[in-house]
Amino acid sequence: MEVLVPFSTDRPKSRLSSVLSRAERTAFARAMCTDVLAAVRAAGGEPTLLTTPPAESPADDLDVDAITAAAGIATPPVIVDDRALSAAVNAQLVDRRPTPDEPVAVVMADLAIATSAAIERLLTADGDVVIAPGRGGGTNALVVRDPSFRVDYHGASVRDHRRIAAAIDADVREIDSHRLASDVDEPADLTEVLLHGDGAAAAWLREAGFRLGVTDGRVGVVRE
């Protein structure tokens, strides 16, 4: 199954700016993408990177060769699209016209604790549209088997995707998975990576001096 992996080079992980510099955010985003690509390939998927045009600073570029070398996989196809996420993904769905025999998946590049088992569960689930909700109402991964389905990632997208599927009478299956629900946007999300990650993203955080700490009985991260 083809798996689109969106990755933006524009202001990478800006909500982590309180704990990471821009260069660090870029490096960490690449490490997360490495983990996702490796998990997709190990799950039997065929990843295609869907990315924005090269950034103004070479340091912010995707650097596909480095990412795929770190993931230990062959360099995947790369599609460059300067449109917003929903428009870019929908353009690919229009081009591919997914069917039950040739579905198309979309897996976000910041699922730092996703495993091949979690992604395989997504890819093999029945349903015209399979949704892996993110925490807070987002949509972290999809499998599309209905050519009429379109995405809308604005706001509480999991609710919107249920509505869109219902409007075209598409059968929906939702995957309840902690590993697929845990995307990394805020500093508090780094705790999940250090607790449950064992790939490039967790290694990057440890090398950057992050470790788990307990404050007022709650586990968080501190930087040495």
Image (cartoon, rainbow, N blue to C red):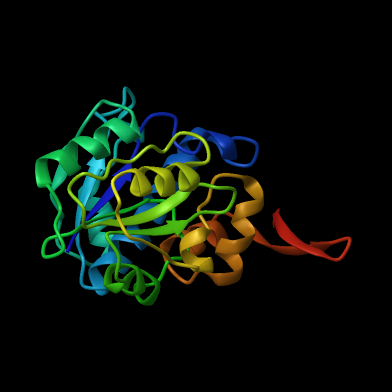
Say above or below: 118 vs 211.
below
In the displayed orientation, state which residue is furthest to the bottom.
Answer: 117
Which residue occupies the foreground of this view, 141 or 31?
A: 141
Report the residue at 55% width, 47% height from top. Answer: 137
Please state if 117 lies on the left or on the right of 144 as rendered.
right
Please state if 90 lies on the left or on the right of 182 as rendered.
left
Q: Quadrant of the C terminus?
A: bottom right
In the displayed orientation, state which residue is furthest to the top.
Answer: 56
Which residue occupies the foreground of this view, 216 or 107?
A: 107
The image shows residue 188 at horizontal and vertical percentages of 66, 51
Please state if 72 lies on the left or on the right of 217 as rendered.
left
**Image quadrant of residue 114?**
bottom left
Q: Total of numbered circles in the picture?
A: 0
Report the residue at 73% width, 59% height from top. Answer: 220
Say above or below: 16 vs 31.
above
Which residue occupies the foreground of this view, 103 or 178?
A: 103
Tell me if I can see residue 57 in this picture.
Answer: yes
Say above or below: 197 vs 6.
below
Which residue occupies the foreground of this view, 75 or 161?
A: 161
The image shows residue 187 at horizontal and vertical percentages of 64, 47
Q: Quadrant of the N terminus?
A: bottom left
Tell me if I can see residue 27 in this picture.
Answer: no
Report the residue at 28% width, 31% height from top. Answer: 87
Please state if 201 lies on the left or on the right of 34 as rendered.
right
Say above or below: 98 vs 160.
below
The image shows residue 124 at horizontal and vertical percentages of 27, 73
Report the residue at 25% width, 26% height from top. Answer: 82
**Image quadrant of residue 79?**
top left
The image shows residue 45 at horizontal and vertical percentages of 21, 66
